[in-house]
């Protein structure tokens, strides 16, 4: 029941953002639809920490900001490798182990690797990820540790 207020706020905001209606009839219908949804969710007992992820929002926003900076840095590094005089691309497959405890944490880490230029997550098997990287010397399994810690912290909670 502790997650109901967060869900109430999220549903009401989402409804208003999509409808934009301010007439009394539409506002009343919006309130009724949000209350009906909350009643169904409570009756079905399907709301818990995982289905109400609003507690993760501050950590996720911080992580997204950090990831954007990493993406820009990786873009610059890949461009230097491609345009540079030596074209120093030496692809490699790296096995990386994640510390994320949940599926969300593992998915966030795998997708963050794929979003970062020069790396692609090829396979995920439990806490093991197979990553294709363009540059061998900067792609040791330990070089993914900061991203792993931050993704696990954002998704699973805790400190980064």
Image (spheres, rainbow, N blue to C red):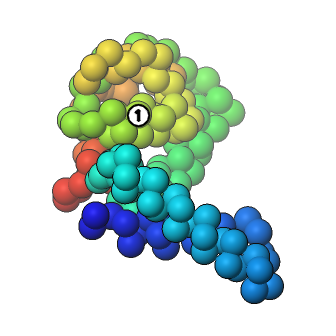
Q: How many marks?
A: 1
Q: Quadrant of residue 13?
A: bottom right
Q: Is residue 1 left or right of residue 111?
A: left
Residue found 33% across the figure and 40% down from its top: 105
Q: Position of residue 57 (x, y in %)?
A: 41, 63
Label 1 sits on a secondary structure element that is helix
Residue sitting nearer the eye, 96 or 87: 96
Can residue 111 be spotted in the picture? Answer: yes
Residue sitting nearer the eye, 70 or 24: 24
Q: Position of residue 118 (x, y in %)?
A: 54, 30
Residue found 61% across the figure and 24% down from its top: 87
Establish if 13 lies above or below 66: below
Establish if 120 lies above or below 73: above
Assign the N terminus to one quadrant of the image.
Answer: bottom left
Q: Position of residue 41 (x, y in %)?
A: 42, 53
Establish if 120 lies above or below 105: above
Residue found 59% across the figure and 45% down from its top: 76
Q: Which residue is mark 1?
A: 107
Q: Is residue 139 left or right of residue 115?
A: left
Q: Quadrant of residue 79?
A: top right
How packed mark 1 is, by other alpha carbons closer than 10 Å (few <14, some 14-19, many 20 or more), is some
């Amino acid at each position: 029941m502790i997650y109901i207020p967060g869900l109430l706020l999220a549903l009401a905001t989402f409804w208003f953002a999509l409808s934009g209606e301010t007439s009394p009839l539409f506002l009343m219908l919006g309130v009724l639809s949000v209350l009906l949804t909350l009643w169904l969710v409570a009756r079905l007992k399907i709301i818990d920490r995982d289905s109400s992820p609003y507690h993760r929002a501050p950590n996720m926003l911080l992580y997204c900001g950090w990831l954007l900076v990493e993406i820009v840095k990786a873009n610059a590094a890949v461009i230097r490798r491609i345009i540079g005089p030596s074209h120093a691309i030496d692809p490699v497959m790296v096995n990386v182990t994640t510390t994320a405890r949940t599926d969300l944490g593992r998915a966030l880490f795998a997708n963050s690797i794929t979003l970062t230029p020069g790396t692609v997550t090829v396979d995920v098997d439990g806490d093991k990820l197979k990553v294709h990287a363009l540059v061998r010397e900067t792609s040791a399994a330990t070089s993914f540790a900061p991203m792993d810690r931050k993704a696990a912290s954002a998704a699973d909670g805790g400190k980064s």
